[in-house]
Amino acid sequence: MRVLFVSSEVHPLAKTGGLADVSEALPKALRAHDVDVRLLMPAYPQAKDRLMAQGAPIALKNVLGFDDVALIPGLLPGSELPIWLIDCPLLYDRPGRLYCDPDGQEWHDNALRYALLSHVVARLARGLTPLAWRPDIVHANDWHTGIIPALLDADTAPRPAVVFTIHNMAYQGNFPAACLDFIGLSSRLYHPDGVEFHNRVSFLKAGVRYADRITTVSPTYASEILSPDFGHGLEGVARQRQNDLVGILNGADYGLWDPVNDRHLIERYDRHYISGKKICKAALLTELGLPAMGNAPLIAFNSRLVEQKMADVVLEAVPAMVAAGGQFALLGEGDRRFESAFADLARRYPESISVRIGYDEPAAHRLLAGADILLAPARFEPCGLTQLYAMRYGTVPIVRRTGGLADTVVDATPETLHAGAATGLSFHDISAAALGEAARRAIELFGQPLLWRRLQVAGMQADFSWERSARRYLDLYRSLRPESQLRRVARGRTPDDDDSYGGRVVNSR
């Protein structure tokens, strides 16, 4: 089976979030099942610098009017995974972050940048490139790849089946309708049952409408996006396709995130030698400039500082955690107002709070190894990976019961603790009081070493490996019949026929 895995970011070539981690780990796991999987992503400057290049670039002519497009073949660093980088200097070779300029503003031509990515995929899928290789399945990820199934669905030519994975329904790639003039998408698709969404072109809606199968990254999130609270205005579209929608839980890459072989740690450990974690904690406190305070638990927050991750609620709850005897360490970046507020908090409590603005992968490993408790709340969370990593490191997560957090963390109740099933603590209400109560319970358990050890060991034993997820995706790929037999999305509906226009309009990236 030949699978083309398409993503806007892949670790370690380019990363802004969990999408990059998934785009590295899932193809690796599929390859272990003898799937001929190949990756494709844009040739950002950092990606070209890090690529293990293999052979000469392959020129592609007249892609959306660009004649300087090429596929750069190579291998993903540290693996045998083949990957092509789409080189188009005018669109991808620029400073700043992947999706934003140096000032943090979204690139004005993002619609064109990711339309070109999609058109290259469509050519490759139809065998219209110099490459002999052609996929049986195209696996597209998030809004950046959303118009791929629409392009392939536009005519009756033979094509591979398309699986479209929604990693976050809030990021939709909504652009002015005028973009149809230059993204190479037929204006015939611009209607309520197509790509039109509140007088804009929605790349994410295109993916949900036209893909043969749709997945999300956890079972609970697959159910949640059918409701207005989590559908971000596209819940009606999701409900129309719910028979083709499945939630497959993301996995953790234990090759990278496991204290038994983590090269970033001063002392490696596992559940049989958990005292090694104390050595990591002592080293971390020194690194952070925090004093060792007897039996005080170290509470970590390793997150983007945005409202989705409840940064505002954490900010309000931290002083009470410190008053209850805890220390707090933050590693993350995001909204400037939260960055400033957390920095102010650290100045108020220099003995108890450390704040590091920014993201550093080795520092994230050391933080998880040295912390006792991880705060991982969210207003919504499609899957979440940090709580999975934390459990493997013996760091007890505190989560809100939503999305993948609800699917992965078992709340510590007297019953689950007695059964050895508890792996963390959870709460429901979006409030500092609810988060604070969960933290109070965690601090209380931390003071009971036998119960705490049981909680740690249960989390460290939990298996969220990509092997399980890869088997689910492999079953999904195999279920896709030849294109001519695939179920087609119903055409010709209007907003009066469904409630796809319900909910909020979200134009986030």
Image (tube, grey):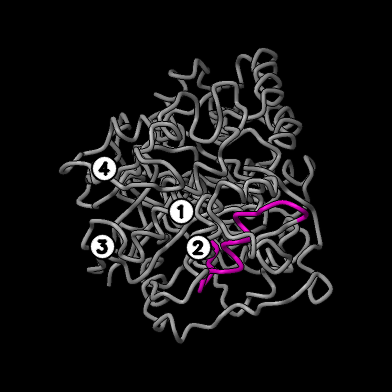
Q: Amino acid at mark 4?
A: Ile
Q: Calculate the distance from the C-alpha at mark 4 to the C-alpha at mark 3.
A: 21 Å
Q: Secondary structure at mark 3?
A: helix
Query: Badge 4 is on which residue?
Result: 72
Asked if the magenta segment contains residue 282, the reply would be no
Q: Nearer the viewer, mark 3 or mark 1?
A: 1
Quarter of the picture holding the C terminus: top right
Q: Amino acid at mark 3?
A: Arg
Q: Residue 21 at what x, y percent from top left?
A: 41, 47
Residue sitting farthest toward the left: 55
Q: Residue at x 47, y 52 (%)?
A: 388
Give the mark, 4 or 3, whose residue is nearer the N terminus. 3
The magenta segment: 198-217
Query: Badge 2 is on which residue?
Result: 151
Give the mark, 4 or 1, whose residue is nearer the N terminus. 4
Q: Calculate the distance from the C-alpha at mark 3 to the C-alpha at mark 1.
A: 23 Å
Q: Secondary structure at mark 2?
A: helix
Give the mark, 4 or 2, whose residue is nearer the N terminus. 4
For the residue carrying disc 2, how many other residues have a C-alpha within 10 Å: few (<14), some (14-19), or many (20+)?
many
Q: Residue 338 at what x, y percent from top left?
A: 69, 26
Query: Badge 1 is on which residue?
Result: 118
Asked if the magenta segment contains residue 208, the reply would be yes
For the residue carrying disc 4, how many other residues have a C-alpha within 10 Å: few (<14), some (14-19), or many (20+)?
many
Give the mark, 1 or 2, whose residue is nearer the N terminus. 1
Q: Amino acid at mark 1?
A: Ser
